[in-house]
Image (tube, coloured by chain):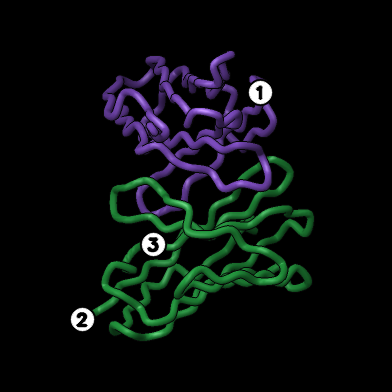
Chain colours: A green, B purple
Amino acid sequence: RKEVEQDPGPFNVPEGATVAFNCTYSNSASQSFFWYRQDCRKEPKLLMSVYSSGNEDGRFTAQLNRASQYISLLIRDSKLSDSATYLCVVNAGNQFYFGTGTSLTVIP
Amino acid sequence: DAGVTQSPTHLIKTRGQHVTLRCSPISGHKSVSWYQQVLGQGPQFIFQYYEKEERGRGNFPDRFSARQFPNYSSELNVNALLLGDSALYLCASSLDTLNYGYTFGSGTRLTVV
């Protein structure tokens, strides 16, 4: 079983739509959690950390459910510039595990 | 401020050769980690260093090794290259190993022929 699992998509949504990505992780001792975005042939860029209480950064909301070992990312009012691959990242015992990424295309 | 810098940006090697990839972290960052990314997949964790000590190791063969220098820069070495080692190698740095996300360099694209 993979350490981190994500739905690879692709998700194709119209501008202005709300879209949610989900991620599950297998190691219950995982300690920190992040969402990254990666544009085609570019390096991953940190989007936001994910906290147990949930956190928001503008149009982006991240949530963590430790009991279900589940992380989510919600993007509201999608913009064309949000088109990218979104990677879920879990830190477990000084090992960082990336999901395979979820591809998002925002359509005009 | 300079971000994470990696060199070289591209590299072509022959099977069986050895390669050294280099990484300079963001100033003030003491943790460096290395990842391998093949097309269509997420980055795979190789090593994590903090204060010049190895703190984490992914599921890679012993042909892969790394070190961190007193100035916190790092090298990734791969011996006896295989065709399957062809990938984008990413270096990332962070203030610590746990609480802060990592900032990535733009990577070294290694092709083994």
Question: Residue A99, percent across and down?
Answer: 53, 57
Residue A90 is left or right of residue A69, and the answer is left
Residue in the image at 78% along x and 71% along y: A67
Q: What residue type is disc 2 on?
A: Pro
State which mark lies toward you, 3 or 1.
1
State which mark lies toward you, 3 or 2.
2
Chain of the residue on which disc 2 is drawn: A
Task: Count numbered badges in the picture.
Answer: 3
Q: What residue type is disc 1 on?
A: Glu
Residue A45 visible to the viewer = yes
Q: Is the C terminus of chain A in the top left, top right, bottom left or bottom right quadrant?
A: bottom left
Residue in the image at 65% along x and 59% along y: A1
Question: Residue B44, percent across and down?
Answer: 52, 44
Residue corresponding to mark 3: A85
Q: Nearer the viewer, residue B32 or A1?
A: B32
Cα distance between the residues tagged 3 and 1: 32 Å
Residue corresponding to mark 1: B51
Residue B26 is left or right of residue B8, and the answer is right
Q: Could you say whether the residue bearing mark 2 is in a helix, strand or loop?
A: loop
Q: Nearer the viewer, residue A39 or A48?
A: A48
Same chain under badges 1 and 2? The reply is no
Residue B96 is left or right of residue B104, and the answer is right
Cα distance between the residues tagged 3 and 2: 18 Å
Q: Could you say whether the residue bearing mark 3 is in a helix, strand or loop?
A: strand
Residue B113 visible to the viewer = no
Please rate how many residues cluster around mark 3, counting C-alpha atoms within 10 Å: few if below 14, some from 14 to 19, many from 20.
Answer: many
Residue in the image at 34% along x and 68% along y: A82
Cα distance between the residues tagged 1 and 2: 47 Å
Residue corresponding to mark 2: A108
Q: Nearer the viewer, residue A91 or A57?
A: A57
Asked if the residue under mark 1 is in contact with the one under mark 3, i.e. CB atoms within 8 Å, the reply is: no
Q: Dividing the picture into quarters, in which one does residue B90 lie? A: top left
